[in-house]
Amino acid sequence: MSEDPYLWLEEVTGDAAMAWVRDRNAETVAELRPEARMSSSRLPGPLR
């Protein structure tokens, strides 16, 4: 049986797991900001 590569996330208050959560939260917040959502560079084809 192969080892679980995300086993370290089981320690939910550990430094590594908390750092991972902070990184994922920062990525999510950046995507949800209004200026990121309305960016013309994200519009497809002729709508740019």
Image (cartoon, rainbow, N blue to C red):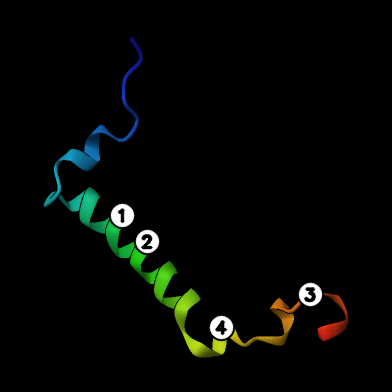
Q: Are marks 3 and 2 in contact (CB under 8 Å)?
A: no
* Residue 11: x %, y % from top left: 14, 42
Image mark for residue 44: 3
- Residue type, mark 1 in image: Trp
Query: Residue 46 falls in which quadrant of the image?
Result: bottom right
Q: Earlier in the sequence, mark 3 or mark 2?
A: 2
Q: Kindly report the distance in space between the C-alpha atoms of the residues bearing marks 1 and 2.
A: 6 Å
Q: Is residue 35 left or right of residue 42?
A: left
Q: Are marks 2 and 4 in contact (CB under 8 Å)?
A: no
Q: Kindly report the distance in space between the C-alpha atoms of the residues bearing marks 2 and 4.
A: 16 Å
Residue visible at 17% across and 52% down?
A: 15
Q: Earlier in the sequence, mark 3 or mark 1?
A: 1
Residue under pointer 4: 36
Q: Secondary structure at mark 1?
A: helix
Residue visible at 55% across and 90% down?
A: 35
Q: Are marks 4 and 1 in contact (CB under 8 Å)?
A: no
Of tags 3 and 1, which is closer to the observer? Answer: 3
What crowding class fits label 3: few (fewer than 14 Cα within 10 Å), some (14-19), or many (20 or more)? few
- Residue type, mark 3 in image: Pro
Image mark for residue 20: 1
Residue under pointer 2: 24
Above or below, 18 relative to 2: below
Q: Earlier in the sequence, mark 4 or mark 1?
A: 1
Residues 24 and 19: in front is 24
- Residue type, mark 4 in image: Ala
